Amino acid sequence: MLEIRSINKRYGTRKVLTDVSFGVDGGRLTGFVGANGAGKTTTMRIILGVLSADSGTVLQDGVPLSSDDRRRFGYMPEERGLYPKMRVGEHLVYLARLHGLSPASARRNTAELLDRLGLGERTGDLVQSLSLGNQQRAQIAAALVHDPEFLVLDEPFSGLDPLAVEVVMSVLSGFAAQGAPVLFSSHQLDIVERLCDDVVIIADGEIRANGPREQLREQHSSPRFELRTAATAEWVRAVPGISVLDLSDGVAVFEAETDAASQAVLRQALDLGPVTSFSQQRPSLATIFKEVVQ
Amino acid sequence: MSTPRNDLAGTPHTDRAQVRPRYPAPSFARSVWLVATREIVARLRSKAFLVSTGILLLISIGSVVAGSIASQNQTLPKVAVVGAAAQIVEQTESFTTVKADDVATAEDLVRDGTVSAAVVPSTRADALLGVRVIALSSPPVGVLAALSVTPAVSVLEPTSRQSDGLVYLVSLGFGLVFFMSAITFGSTIAQSVVEEKQTRVVEILMTTIPVRALLGGKVVGNSIMAFGQIVAISSLVAIGMATTGQISLLGTVGPSILWFAVFFAFGFIMLAALFAATASMVSRQEDVGSATSPVLFLVMIPYFLVIFFNDNPTVLAIMSYIPFSAPVGMPMRIFLGTAAWWEPLLSLAILLASTAVVILLGSRIYSNSLLRMGARVTLRQALRG
């Protein structure tokens, strides 16, 4: 469990982070969402200790992080970078050894990881000779090669082709499944929605929403329902306390003033014929995002 | 690697994190060494580096060989000799003798330019050696000097033990080698600092090892390469001198070359730290030149000073104590024999102290500048952080 507590940061006169607090749980993927310049990279750099905060602390299991703890982090910066003239395998071994791995375990981890990311055949190639997508994969390997205890990735999916997105998604969730906390930022809300257990939304240097994904969707749900029946649904218009938003064949989308009113619709529908689906419409992450950043 | 993600919601698996192997962080020295090794390997793989080193080695071995050939091919002046004069002339071992049957033949040889002079027996009473010298248009100074008797000479205040030509050559050699190596490896280190900044790999490195270890590794790696180059050049020159029969010259220059190597090692570390620190203030390779130009001046000034003032003891004495010029100035004074035994030690102590200060300041500038991309970082920002 990693806890970011009341971080403040200003660059000169510009305040970039205001009282930023959130937690990243072990074994879960946490998505960090915000517009450009909202403060995502600055927050991540402070977590990693390459930048210092003006005030506030980063705690791991209740204890402030030391630089030794941070060595066991894996980091993928937003601006990608590896030595262009090093061989892929060599580069990963080098980074692993800087993290304290023995030459043998560094080589073993490198080989395993490159295979898993589909780069096994590129081990001996120069980084600069890789395609952009493969450079991204190598970059992710660089963040993982030392078996980190905590993973921080800045925009890991930007610039990836759909196939690579799938590979990286499975690697990240596999990593989280081993019990490590994973924090990553992304512009691609659909990926965050699919992948993340927890979501943190930041705007103008402030945390606007923060919590488990489903809980957030719950909190931002309007009393809007969708009913699908085998029969026509014209009758829904007549139910008291209901205003129909959309109606076609057997599908009705409506808002209910009270819970009782929506339940009344369901009961009546069951009396009239088979109901294939009755659900409260949950807003997408994109909708929530728009709502909270305004 | 598909995982039932959603099932994990609410069930923290922190207990499983303990299964993950815990690698102890490498020691500071270990980190420095890992970075240094990478620098060295990167340098050894660079074609530009290999070619330039090869050229430098060829030039140094070439100059030794050329020097020896020039000294061997110095042809002795030809002198015609007649009769008993031959013995006297051959004793001097300064001439190639051409035997002539009589004085008239010898005079002909002088006239047609085959020989520069003729030495013939003389029966005159005032001929001390019993010979007479015949020349074409003016008395042959070289021949007369070789044949004359010189009394013993005592010089009370010798200006220098070394000949002017050799002094110039040695000062040029120290100056040039220091200048070339400092510029070559200094700009290499500057480029590699900016490369890391430009490719952003520095951000990963900074989260992995202390910034000081990164700077230390770069300085150590490049210093080892620079020093290795110096040692290679010096040993090639020494071996070359020994095998081409210039042992006496080696004995004269040897001690100052050793001191040069010692001073160079520490002087270069200081320069390397300065190159790294100034380069870290910019973000693009195009800006490296202008950022590091103040350091280039510090390297160039001693180079020009030693070439123009190698005969000026005051300038040399001052140079030999200023840290930037000491690697050239002090070996020069040792070569000239004008430094007391404790002087190189004192100068070395000054150099070590200033190297320590420069490394402290340099690492401060370096760590404060690494994450500042875009516009050039001002010195004030870099020092203040």
Image (spheres, coloured by chain):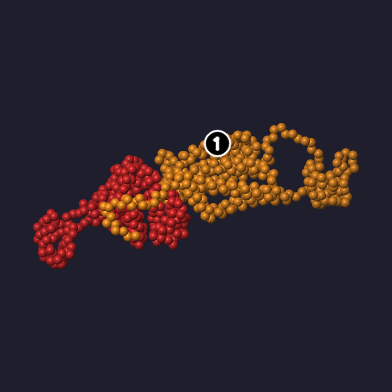
Residue A142 appears left or right of B41 = left
The residue drawn where x is 51% and y is 52% is B41
Instruction: State which quadrant residue A8 falls in.
Output: top left
The colour chain A appears in is: red
- Whether residue B303 is visible to the viewer of this picture, yes or no, is no
Residue B126 appears left or right of B178 = right
> Where does residue A204 sit, x and y in percent of width and height?
29, 47
Q: Identify the subunit bearing mark 1.
A: B
Q: Helix or strand or loop: what does disc 1 sit on? A: helix
Viewer-nearest residue: B323 or B145? B323
> Where does residue B364 sit, x and y in percent of width and height?
44, 41
Viewer-nearest residue: B215 or B191? B215
The residue drawn where x is 64% and y is 35% is B338
Instruction: State which quadrant residue A10 falls in.
Output: top left
> Where does residue B26 sit, x and y in percent of width and height?
44, 47
Viewer-nearest residue: A219 or A110? A110
Viewer-nearest residue: B12 or B307? B12
The residue drawn where x is 53% and y is 38% is B352
Return the residue at label 1: B349
**Which amino acid type is marked by label 1?**
Ala
How many marks on residues? Answer: 1
Compared to residue A133, the image places residue B15 above or below, namely: above
The residue drawn where x is 80% and y is 44% is B92
- Whether residue B43 is visible to the viewer of this picture, yes or no, is yes
In the picture as drawn, the residue positioned furthest to the top comes out as B156
Who's orange, chain-wise?
Answer: B
> Where does residue A30 sit, x and y in percent of width and height?
30, 52
Q: Residues within 10 Å of mark 1 (few under 14, many from 20)?
A: some
Residue B285 appears left or right of A170 = right
